[in-house]
Amino acid sequence: MKPVLSELLVAASVFFGALPQERSIHLLDPWIRPGAAGGNSALYVRLHNAGSVPDTLLEATAEVAARVELHQTVSGPGNMRRMEPVSYVVLPARGEFRLEPGGWHVMLLGLKRDLRAGDTVKVELRFARAGRVQLQAPVRPLSRGGRR
């Protein structure tokens, strides 16, 4: 009888763990760099997880780009910096993860139109627990020093 009960508990935890967490993910201060049609741009945003368990950003989509990838900037030989795609980003429970210039970010590859300061771009982020979250990100230029 105990194995059946433990199997039910595992199944219930998997089932309930897959349900979206109501308002657990907050997207703070999103913005996108300007870019020309055919080129690339990037989305930056502070991801705040108010939930009691970690969540994982799995992918992003945007109609304005042919492809969208999660990236991180890494230092290579001779302190050369380059971007590398990543499969996911983990958000700690009751914590924050920043997608920002010079670090982790969402790449918008093969822009379908020019992105100019003042434009707004719709982006959808998909999380393992919270599901799909949409945002409207304004296009803003990068200021001197790598920050806006």
Image: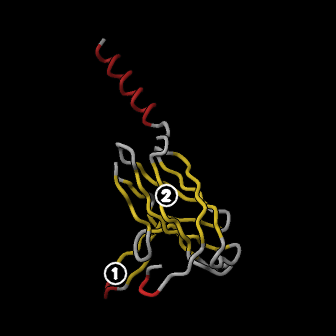
Q: Residue at x 38, y 55 (%)?
A: 90
Q: Is residue 26 above or below residue 12?
A: below
Q: Position of residue 77 (x, y in %)?
A: 32, 84
Q: Position of residue 131 (x, y in %)?
A: 52, 46
Q: Position of residue 34 (x, y in %)?
A: 60, 79
Going by the numbered disc 1, the residue's amino acid type is Gly
- In this rendering, would 113 be left or right of 117? right
Question: Is 59 in front, or is 130?
Answer: 130
The disc at residue 76 is 1
| Callout 1 crowding tier (Cα within 10 Å): few <14, some 14–19, many ≥20 | few
The disc at residue 36 is none
Splitting the image into 4 quarters, where does residue 65 fall? Answer: bottom right
Q: Residue at x 41, y 86 (%)?
A: 145
Q: Earlier in the sequence, mark 1 or mark 2?
A: 2
| Callout 2 crowding tier (Cα within 10 Å): few <14, some 14–19, many ≥20 | some
Q: Residue at x 54, y 69 (%)?
A: 31
Quadrant of the image containing the N terminus: top left
Going by the numbered disc 2, the residue's amino acid type is Leu
The disc at residue 27 is 2
Q: Residue furthest top?
A: 1
Say how many tags the image has: 2
**Measured Cα–Cα span from mark 1 to mark 2:** 30 Å
Q: Position of residue 96 (x, y in %)?
A: 37, 58
